[in-house]
Image (cartoon, rainbow, N blue to C red):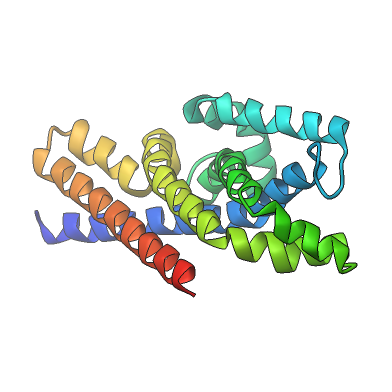
């Protein structure tokens, strides 16, 4: 590869890292509270609200069931409203975040549900408020599972960001299509694939190490 292509590969890597990093942070910011809401309002939860739980659950399932490429196109008006454009890195962050949030919420919900019910009942017996139960019991006990779920989410988002790049979002997907596929440059295509694999392996390794450290505490 020429020096120019290496520079473009580096810039594409940075764009993909930015897309995934910001989207993953926003997905965690919205997805974890959403998971807590689903658990708390479920039958037998610390704040039962079956109707609210059913509505929120239906919305989460609806977004999860929508393929990312369809969601990418359907959210173009919202993307234009929030990002001011429908192409580029920041435009891709909107559908990436909306796609990843319900995905992470369901994984985090499973982890929170697996917290020993006895711990929750003990906290309630001591007069703890619902917020204290969430903050000091549910989230700390479920943290390893949530981190594991976030790792899976980020890995999925790396693939989704490449798909978004193919429709004008920039990043590694855009480079693979523009310079690898359209120009029949196998070297560029292989280089992009290697970088994507390296990103996935790095994220998975870091996530696994973090989960093991949390469980060892």
Query: In this view of the protein, can residue 84 be seen by the observer?
Result: no
Which residue corresponds to the image point at 24% horizontal and 49% vertical from the top-left?
Answer: 197
Which residue corresponds to the image point at 79% horizontal and 47% vertical from the top-left?
Answer: 40
Indicate whether 120 appears above or below 95: below
Query: In this view of the protein, can residue 76 be seen by the observer?
Result: yes
| In the image: residue 35, left or right of residue 216 | right
Locate residue 85, reporting x and y percent.
58, 43
Q: In the picture, residue 205 is in which quadrant?
A: bottom left
Front residue of 127 and 186 = 127
| In the image: residue 188, left or right of residue 72 | left
Front residue of 76 and 130 = 130
Which residue corresponds to the image point at 67% horizontal and 33% vertical from the top-left?
Answer: 60
Front residue of 172 and 21 = 21
Locate residue 71, reporting x and y percent.
56, 29
Front residue of 154 and 176 = 154
Which residue corresponds to the image point at 37% horizontal and 35% vertical from the top-left?
Answer: 166
Pick the quarter of the image with the N terminus.
bottom left
| In the image: residue 155, left or right of residue 61 | left
Indicate whether 65 appears above or below 46: above
Q: In the picture, residue 151 is in which quadrant?
A: bottom left
Locate residue 48, reporting x and y percent.
87, 41
Locate residue 198, reporting x and y percent.
24, 55
């Amino acid at each position: 590869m020429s020096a120019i292509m290496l520079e473009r590969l580096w810039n594409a890597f940075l764009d993909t890292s930015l897309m995934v990093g910001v989207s993953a942070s926003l997905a965690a910011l919205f997805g974890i509270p959403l998971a807590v809401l689903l658990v708390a309002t479920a039958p037998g939860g610390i704040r039962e609200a079956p109707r609210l739980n059913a509505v929120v659950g239906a919305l989460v399932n609806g977004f999860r069931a929508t393929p990312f490429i369809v969601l990418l196109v359907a959210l173009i008006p919202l993307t234009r409203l929030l990002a001011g454009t429908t192409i580029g890195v920041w435009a891709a962050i909107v559908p990436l975040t909306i796609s990843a949030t319900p995905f992470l919420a369901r994984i985090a919900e499973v982890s929170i549900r697996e917290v020993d019910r006895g711990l929750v009942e003990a906290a309630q017996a001591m007069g703890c408020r619902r917020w204290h139960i969430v903050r000091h019991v549910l989230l700390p006990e479920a943290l390893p599972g949530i981190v594991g779920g976030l790792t899976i989410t980020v890995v999925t988002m790396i693939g989704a960001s490449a798909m978004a790049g193919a429709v004008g979002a920039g990043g590694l997907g855009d480079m693979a299509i523009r310079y690898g596929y359209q120009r029949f440059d196998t070297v560029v295509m292989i280089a992009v694939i290697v970088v994507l694999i390296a990103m996935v392996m790095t994220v998975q390794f870091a996530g696994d190490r973090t989960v093991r450290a949390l469980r060892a505490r």
